[in-house]
Amino acid sequence: MQKYMETVRRIPYAFILGPLFMTLEASGEFLLPYLMADIINIGAAGHDTAFILRQGALMAVMALFMLIFGVLGAWFAIQAATALAADLRFKTYTRIQTFSFSQIDDFSTGSLITRITNDVTQIQNFAQQLLRGAFRSPIMLIGALVMSMVMDPHLAMILFVVVPLLGLAIFLIIKIASPRYTAMQGSLDALNNYISESLTNEYVIKSFVREDFEEAHFSRVNGDLVDKSLRALRMMLFLQPAITLAVSVSTLAAVWIAGRRIMIGSMAVGTLAAFTTYLSQVLTSLQFLANIFLIGTRAAASDRRISQVLETEPDLSDAEAGEKTKVIKEGSVEFKCLTFRYFKEDPQPVLDHISLRIESGRMVGIVGATGSGKSTLISMIPRLYDPDSGAVYVDGTNVKDLSLAHLREAVAVVLQKNTLFSGTVAENLRWGNEKAGLEEMKEACRVACADAFIEAMPEGYDTEVEQGGRNFSGGQRQRLCLARAILKKPRILILDDSTSAVDTATDASIRRALAQALPGVTKIVIAQRIGSVMEADQIIVMEEGRIAGIGTHEALLASCLPYREIWFSQKDKEESL
Ligand SMILES: Nc1ncnc2c1ncn2[C@@H]1O[C@H](COP(=O)(O)OP(=O)(O)OP(=O)(O)O)[C@@H](O)[C@H]1O
Ligand SMILES: [Mg+2]
């Protein structure tokens, strides 16, 4: 509830005026039949035209006011519900921003998208219905019951039989439908997960001619959602007929009972007319309440799903005591007996007791077969993931004791799966340093060998980058990401396979420029080609989550079998080219 109060406090008037106007409208609703009964009983029966006109005019004025109140009530309710949803989306989004990679993995991106869109909409719908009907429907229900009692207590007995029966039926319908709605929402998660994955990788799907397979997969996920939705909505089919049946049966009973009494003259025709109107008012307001309950059960499921996000404490919380203000000056890195699994139940760890020291200012290469844990290892330094046991030290301080802001300011990572954002080239580069001037950007691009192709574009640094950087080649994208990282002026620069899509000659000139332009910076370079890290001060060889060897190229060639194997396999390939 707490999460909604902020919005209520921000625009309290909308939350008060919405129900208030709807209540005013409802009061008119049960006065109208009363006036109408008088027209029939007194005006029509007594041929009193003046009375009919007067009473009719009164009804018209009332109807006009009811219209105005109805519109105003709905308007404020919509305002309140929309603001509530916007605030909720914002809150959820900001919370997700604080999540670590593993927390996002746990929820799954698709589920987070569903929560922030569809689940919020469910709550918005409910809030709107609630503000419009929460007072109006009970008032109409009670008002109509009281008015019918006042007019004819005998006839009103019908309502006291029908209303509880109908209430029971509605209760049962909702009880069955509610868990089905939760299941439906789960299927929607699966669908969104699938869509977000396949649409972002549309290119891969096309290039592997996997459309048929993917279509089949999609129709499975989609079919599941259809099944679950039908199961949930099928229950709802009974609601409308149940109410219609109740209205018909009660009207029939009323006409039957009243008809005989009208014939013997103990009841006026107008009373029957008014009574049947009250009857349908009672039943429609019951229907409205049932609807609110139903949307409410759906919204409750959504509320739980959103609360799960909001109540998840970011597991990468900033250092509480620790050396919060410590600025990283040197850039040495040390792993101490570090073990890590992505899935805690896996028997084999992805990183297995890694201990390793990297002196500041060094250039360190990491090589190893694919899947050996290279990317995982470096992701521990800026705390993209936290180790299960053991620790990472930067400048002698456990990274968990440093503030995330300080840590990530000092560590620049060019991830293997790097991304550019929509905006211009310059805007993308400024992710590295908001205040960077054009000269500074040009310098960084020169080091990353990105200057030539940017300047060759007609718009230069103002060239628009399309979503995900589609309009740049793989190698160009890598170099832009590299320039972005250099602009950050980090103490530790980590390149994860960042020049894999760049030709060997450019790769070599990037390496030379990096060594010159960033002399004191610790550089950790993951590479597939040993040639890219051959001159490093230290090369680390990874094998199945363990370190198979550390040393210079020459030392490793002499002593490390896995290294020799990689080296000769690559040499043979290059020679055969
Ligand atoms: N986000 C993730 N969730 C679960 N498992 C993962 C995740 N990322 C990597 N893994 C697994 O961890 C292991 C090590 O992966 P990692 O990406 O560190 O390898 P790598 O040495 O960088 O390989 P490559 O050379 O192909 O980039 C692999 O078995 C991989 O399947
Ligand atoms: Mg990798």
Image (tube, grey):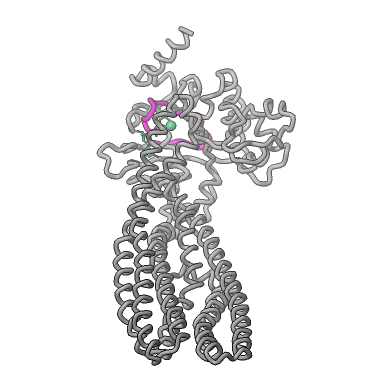
Q: Count how many numbered circles sit on residues in the image.
A: 0
Residue at image coords 38%, 72%: 247
Residue 348 vs 397, above or below: the answer is above
Residue drawn 49% across and 54% down?
Answer: 117
Which of the two residues, 342 or 394, is positioned nearer the viewer here?
A: 342
Query: Is 271 contained in the magenta span?
Result: no
Give the x, y percent position of residue 3: 47, 67
Q: Residue furthest right?
A: 458
State the image coordinates of residue 97 (x, y, percent, origin top left): 50, 52
Relative depth, front residue between 22 and 506 = 22
Residue 297 drawn at (x, y percent): 37, 64
Do we see residue 86 in this rendering? Answer: yes
Q: Work out which residue is located at the far left of the displayed protein and give it.
A: 347
Measured along the vertical axis of the image, is residue 334 above or below residue 296? above
Q: Write down the quadrant of residue 145 in the picture.
A: bottom left
Taking the image in four quarters, ligand 1 sits in the one at top left
Front-most of 290 and 502?
Answer: 290
Residue at image position (57%, 74%) is 70
Residue at 32% x, 46% y: name it.
389
- The range drawn in magenta is 356-374
- Is residue 385 something one can see in this rendering? no
- Asked if the stretch drawn in magenta spans residue 360, the answer is yes
Pinpoint residue 321: horizontal percent, then vertical percent.
45, 60
> Would you place residue 204 above or below residue 576 in this image?
below
Residues 395 and 489: in front is 489
Q: Quadrant of the N terminus?
A: bottom left
Q: Which quadrant holds residue 335?
A: top left
